[in-house]
Image: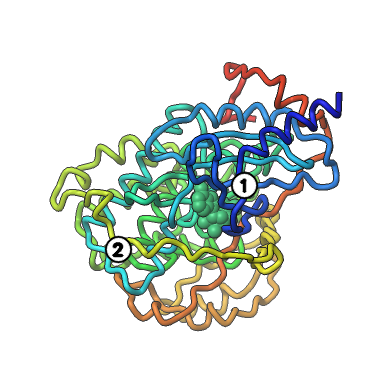
Amino acid sequence: MAEVEQLLSKKVADRYLKREVLGEGTYGVVFKAIDTKTGQTVAIKKIRLGKQKEGVNFTALREIKLLKELKDENIIELIDTFPHKGNLHLVFEFMETDLEAVIRDRNIVLSPADIKSYIQMTLKGLSFCHRKWILHRDMKPNNLLIGSRGQLKLADFGLARIFGSPDRRFTHQVFARWYRAPELLFGAKQYGPGVDVWAAACIFAELLLRRPFLQGNSDIDQLGKIFAAFGTPKPSQWQDMVYLPDYVEYQYVPGQSLRTLFPMASDDALDLLSKMFTYDPKSRISAQHALEHRYFSSIPPPTEPALLPRPPPKRELNNAKVSDFNVQEGPTVLSPPRKVRRVMPHREGFDLNAHHMDKMDVRGNEIRPTAGERGEQAPTSLDFSVFGMRPPNRPTINRYILSCRHLVSLNFILCQLTLASSDLNLYVE
Ligand code: ADP
C-alpha cells in the first residue's frame, strides 16, 4: 500500500517543474514552478509536516479540499494539492508582487483612486469568503498578492485556521499583531468575520499613511496603541468587552479625531474607516456593507486594476538556498492575566505623562522601549519621511508544526478524500 501511495504522489509531483525559491513563509518554503500539463506558472507552497512524515491531520486535509472550491477573482486560486516526500504541497496561481511591496516602494505614489481600488478588491475578496462562512484570520499586506494585470487577491485564506489550530480550537493568537482586532487581543475564543474587517481597516490606514498604523510590540501595547488612537472603549460602546477572557481595564483616554490621524483622507474614507474600526464586533460594518458604502461610489472612481501603480515583479531568487531566507519565528504572545491593575494607553507624542506608565507591563514591570519605538512619530498622512527608513520587522503568527495527534496516512487520505462540506462549521468551536 505504501509503495502505491509513493508512486502516485511521485506521479503528481513530476507534473511540476520546480524553479527558484520565492520565499519562506509561516508554513514553509514557496517555489516557483511550471505546470508541464498546462504550461502555467504556479507557486508551490511546501508545508513541512514535522517529524511525522507519514501523516497529517484529517480535518486539515478536508478543509484544504474546501479551499479548492473557493473560486473568486479576488481570492488566490488553490489549483492542486499533493503529498511528496512527506511534505504537503499546495499549488497556487503565480502572483507577481504583493501589497506590502506596493506600500513600501518609495517610487510609487498612490492616488486616492488607487487606494480606493486596492481596498475595494480586498473587501471583495473578504466578502466572498465571509459569504462562504470562512474567515481569513491572517490579513496583512503581504498576504494580499497582486497579479500581472493588477488584480489583488487574498492569499493564505483559511490556512491560519487549518495549520494554526488543527485540533479545531479557535485560537485567538492569529493575525500579525498589528492587524489584530481588539476582541482577539482580549482573548475572545468565539469570534466572527469582524476580525478580518478590523485587519482590512488597518490595511486601509496603512495605504493612507504608507506605514503600518498601529505597531504594538506586545498584546498589551497593541491595545494601548489602539485606545490611544480611538479612545479607551466605554462599556456602553462595547458591552461584552468586560467579559472577555483576557480583559484588562485600561485607563480612560479620549480618542483623537480621524481627521487628525489621516489628514489627507476624504470625508467618505474617514466615515468608512470609523465603521470598520468600530470596537464592538457586533456593530462593526461587514465587508459587504463596506463595499456598499458611498466611499466607493463617490468620486474619484477606483482605478482600473490594470492601471494601478505597482513595483516591478519580484526579483527572481535564482539558486537561493532556503537557509538564506530570513525565517521569522513568530513572537511569543503573552496574553495578559485577568485584570489586576489599570493599564494606561500610550499615546506617543501626545501625552507625555502617559509615556512612562505605558512602559509597564501588566505585572507592573518596566518595559524598555525598542529602538523603533523610541524613534516613532505620531502618524501623519502620506508620511514620506518613512521611505528612507527600513520598516521594523513585522510580527508574524507563531510557526506551527502540525500536531502528530490523529495522524492518518497523508497519501491515503489525499487519494480517498471525499468532501463533506456540510459538517464544516468554520466560525465556532
Ligand atoms: P507568509 O506565510 O509569511 O504569509 P507565504 O508562505 O505566503 O508567507 O509566502 C512566502 C513567500 O512566497 C513570499 O515572499 C510570498 O510573496 C511568496 N508567495 C507566496 N504565494 C505566492 C504566489 N501565489 N505567487 C508568487 N509568490 C508567492
Is ligand 1 closer than 8 angstroms to the Cβ of mark 2?
Answer: no
Answer above or below: position of 257 versus 285.
below
Left or right: residue 175 versus residue 232 is: right
Which quadrant is the C terminus positioned in? top right
Q: Nearer the viewer, residue 253 or 419?
A: 419
Q: Amino acid at mark 1?
A: Lys
Q: Are marks 1 and 2 in contact (CB under 8 Å)?
A: no
Q: Name the image quarter holding residue 55.
A: top right
Where residue 191 is drawn, which disc sits there? Answer: none
Left or right: residue 54 versus residue 47 is: right
Is ligand 1 closer than 8 angstroms to the Cβ of mark 1?
Answer: yes
Q: Residue visible at 67% across and 69% down?
A: 324
Helix, strand or loop at mark 1: strand
Which quadrant is the N terminus positioned in? top right
Answer above or below: position of 1 versus 372.
above
Q: Residue visible at 60% across and 28% down?
A: 65
Residue bearing mark 1: 45
Residue bearing mark 2: 257
Q: Amino acid at mark 2?
A: Ser
Answer above or below: position of 35 versus 361.
above
Residue 359, horizontal then vertical, whole percent: 60, 75
